Image: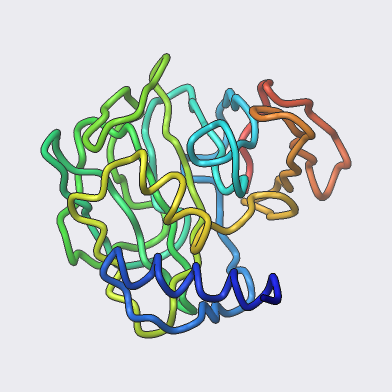
Amino acid sequence: MNVSVRMAGLAAAVISAVGLAATPASAAPFPELTLPFAAGQQVYSAGVHSDDGSTGVKNAIDFSPADGTVRAPLAGTVRLQHCAGGDWVTLDHPGGWRTGYYHLEGIRVTDGEQVEAGAVLGSTGNALPCGGSSTGAHVHFTLWTLPDAAAGDWDGVAFARLSTTVAAALGEPIDGKTLGAWRFAAGSEQYSGTATHVAEGVVVQLPGRFRASR
């Protein structure tokens, strides 16, 4: 069987399994996202990695802003994902894009709420509502593309499944994406890569620190 056919079949199966409509992902061009925290502060990033930190599409990057406050990088609709251990935050944006925020503590938004760019979502932390692991307070920021007809309901989906099976079908690589003034590139290893200031050309090796700017 042709590889592309097999992958299309896998994606359809995964989408159906997590409660999404079985239609191909067709997100609009990447939106103008800011960094998910206030500008003007020092930020530590552990680097670009796959959702589970082991294998698969590198759709995740960890951030630890100095003020510990995580904010919406673009206007969107809050979709809280519920598990036995609590909730975690996703935001649905126009054009089929979704951003995810795992490990948040003190969540400040409600399911279905419409938020503007800069709205406070919660604080960096080590929360594990659906499983996984965490070392040091941070936000596990992820990118996703949802099918046009998707409800995107991941309630009860364990992190072990979300970060592998679901990420394989719907995860969007961080590599080459610009957030605010910085463009991020994945490295050859997990938890690596670079952050390049688009206007100034400054390159920061990740893991590393940089000054947030929009």
Give left or right: position of 64 versus 113: right
Q: Residue at x 78, y 26 (%)?
A: 205
Q: Residue furthest front?
A: 1
Considering only vertical position in the picture, is 209 above or below 83?
Answer: above
Q: Nearer the viewer, residue 16 or 137?
A: 16
Quarter of image, res 192: top right
Query: Residue 28: x, y in percent?
Result: 58, 80
Compare residues 74 and 16 and report the one nearer the observer: 16
At x 50% / y 81%, what residue is drawn?
24
- Residue 36, horizontal then vertical, whole percent: 47, 45
- State left or right for residue 179 relative to residue 164: right
The residue depicted at 49 percent of the width and 63 percent of the height is 170
Residue at the image point whose x is 18% and y is 50% from the top = 156
Report x, y in % for residue 98.
43, 63
**What is the residue that sits farthest to the right in this orientation?**
201
Left of 76 or right of it: where is 145? Answer: right
- Quadrant in which the N terminus appears: bottom right
Callout count? 0
Identify whether 205 is placed above or below 4. Answer: above
Q: Nearer the viewer, residue 50 or 117?
A: 50
Q: Nearer the viewer, residue 52 or 122?
A: 52
Q: How is the image coloured?
A: rainbow
Residue 112, located in which quarter of the rendered image? bottom left
